[in-house]
Amino acid sequence: MSARPLRRLGTLPVDAFVARYWQRHPLCVRQAIPGFVNPVKVAQLRALAQRAEVESRLVTQAGGRWRLRHGPIPARALPALHRPGWTLLVQGVDLHLRAAAQLAMRFRFLPAARFDDVMISVAGDGGGVGPHVDQYDVFLLQAQGRRRWRIARDFDPALAPGLPLRILQRFRHEEEWVLAPGDLLYLPPGVAHEGVALGDCVTISIGFRLPPWQEIAEAWYERQGELAPREGRLPDTARRATRAPGSLPAGMAQAAARQLGRMAPTPAQMRATLLAYLTEPKPSVVFDAPRPALSRAAFARAATTRGVELDLRTRLLYAQREVAINGDAVDTAGLDAAQRRALRRLADCHSLAPASVRGEVLLALFYAWYGYGWVRLAINGGWEP
């Protein structure tokens, strides 16, 4: 499968999708990706669910009773595909399987800063997780078998009590579709939905999220703590003895407000904060250093012959002259214009052709990232279109 971003969802141009539906309205697209073939095998998902570093959940229901088990899930606990009433959900499949990462690349007609992960669910007949609401955008791509989706935009938000899942207590659907392989359902945030497998099936969820304002504020103030300490202290403006020692002096609060107002981020500081925050790897991610590692000279020869690509778990973003990778700011001062373009190309495409891997400073940067496990030598020429 090509990693080139989609230009159409079915017959709908992606520009029209973004203008009319993105963040606004649900949309069902029949044969959104013509000729689509499921790129991930059920056996691969079952194997991932058994690994401690992979987030997975097993949901079963029978007789109105719901059970939830978090991974790692041993092989003996994973139901047979023909058994009804269960769903296995595996998060972050794009971090572990190249085929899932390539599928996510096809949705890069949207900013990578919005991308969250690829989750894949495997279900037996009747399997699902109940009617619920998510606060992120999701493309639900049917990969194998059939699934019935029901949605509601006007719904009762009350949750069923005493369940291990956040299931809506009184869900009445407004629209319904049955998806076959290659069909896609887009849901914006805040739309209640319920998916039920009609026979065994596999559904791929490509999720996009926006961080809450609180998280952005916390990232900014955490970054403030990493900068040089600020000089001075709150001033003491007292000129007379107090008769109310328990009262906060008004001058102290006013001075603090003035000082904090001066700490408002500049546009460049805010870009740097967002880049660091949005490239921070998920908590479960651990990078593997190459073993045995190539010498710097051997790496340079190979990189300029084969090209380089990002590790599946690496996040690289840029904004104007600022660049961040896996939560760290990148010093680009020594790069010339062509090398900066190459770095942006790597962020956009996740790989660089050999002709773009040029210059001692850029090679030194890539070699450091190679040592951390963030970058590797390209496989089969990489993914760059």
Image (cartoon, rainbow, N blue to C red):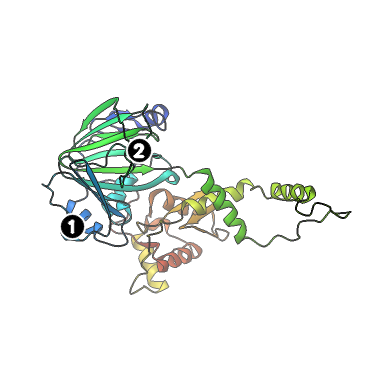
Answer left or right for 344 relative to 4.
right
Q: How packed is label 1: few (under 14 Cα within 10 Å), some, or many (20 or more)?
A: few
Q: Nearer the viewer, residue 384 or 37?
A: 37
Identify the residue position indicated by label 2 in the image. Answer: 159
Residue at x-position 38% and y-position 68%: 301
Identify the residue position indicated by label 1 in the image. Answer: 77
Answer left or right for 128 relative to 221.
left
Percent of width and height locating residue 216: 53, 48
- Reply above or below: 143 against 329: above
Q: Residue furthest left?
A: 82
Task: Report if residue 320 is visible in the image.
Answer: no
Amino acid at circle 2:
Leu
Percent of width and height locating residue 73: 23, 59
Q: How packed is label 2: few (under 14 Cα within 10 Å), some, or many (20 or more)?
A: some
| Count of numbered marks | 2
- Reply above or below: 148 against 297: above
Answer left or right for 71 relative to 345.
left
Amino acid at circle 1:
Ala
Residue 335 is marked as: none
Q: Secondary structure at mark 2?
A: loop
Q: Secondary structure at mark 1?
A: helix
